[in-house]
Amino acid sequence: MHLVAISTVEIHAADSRSMALQARLSALVETLQALSGCTSYTLTRCSSRQNVWIMTGYWSAQATMQAHFSLPCLTDLFALTLERFANALKFGTFQLNAPAPEGNDANPCRHAVAETRERPVFVD
């Protein structure tokens, strides 16, 4: 299946809340996998910063990705900050171009990312 976009959320755990945050995020990813229409949704712990979790959605249609941003379950991310499980959220979307036809470009990676948007949210 051809991907057209990737969405990410980088979630910074509050002090000593990383494991509790993981449980909440795992449940959210499971819900998003079932409801969002994405090709795949994953949760990964950052290897260099143990208090950071990254949720990633892979999309085969722009419209489906845009519609998923309105799902009520995504408000759970903001609840995590209000409940002090997380102290920062960073949202990103990556719009992908179709790869160049074979033989037309020596560097096919050059065509991969067309646009990147990041939206940080910090909580004091």
Image (tube, grey):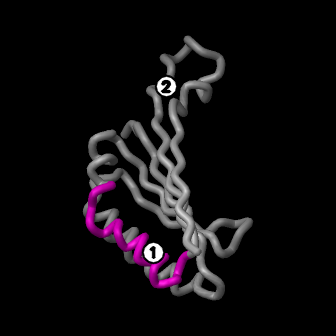
The residue under the point 65% across, 17% down is 106
In percent of the image, x 50 and y 66: which residue is there? Answer: 43
Tell me the element at label 1: helix
Residue at x 58% of width, y 75% of height: 124
Residue at 44%, 75% (x, y): give it.
26
Q: Name the foreground residue: 101 vs 58.
A: 58
Farthest-out residue, right: 48
Left or right: residue 114 compared with residue 72? right
Q: Nearer the viewer, residue 118 or 68?
A: 118
User: What is the crowding at mark 1: few (fewer than 14 residues within 10 Å), some, or many (at least 20)?
Assistant: many
Task: From the image, tell me which residue sits under label 1.
Answer: 25
Residue 51 occupies quadrant: bottom right
Check whether the beta carbons of the residues at disc 2 and disc 1 lie within 8 A of each other: no
Query: Residue 111 appears at what percent x and percent y?
Result: 55, 25
**Residue 1 in magenta stretch:** no
**Of pointers 2 and 1, the one earlier in the residue sequence:** 1
Q: Which residues are magenta?
A: 69-86
Extreme residue in the front direction? 124
Q: Where 34 sits versus 82, above or below? A: above
Local SS, label 2: loop
* Percent position of residue 91, x then y: 50, 55
Compared with 1, 36 (above or below) is below
Residue kind at label 2, given as amino acid type? Pro
Q: Position of residue 53 (x, y in %)?
A: 57, 69
- Asked whether, in this view, residue 13 is left or right of residue 30, the answer is right
Near-viewer residue (44 or 84): 84
Name the residue beneath numbered marker 2.
Answer: 99
Q: Nearer the viewer, mark 2 or mark 1?
A: 1
Q: Tag 1: residue type?
A: Leu
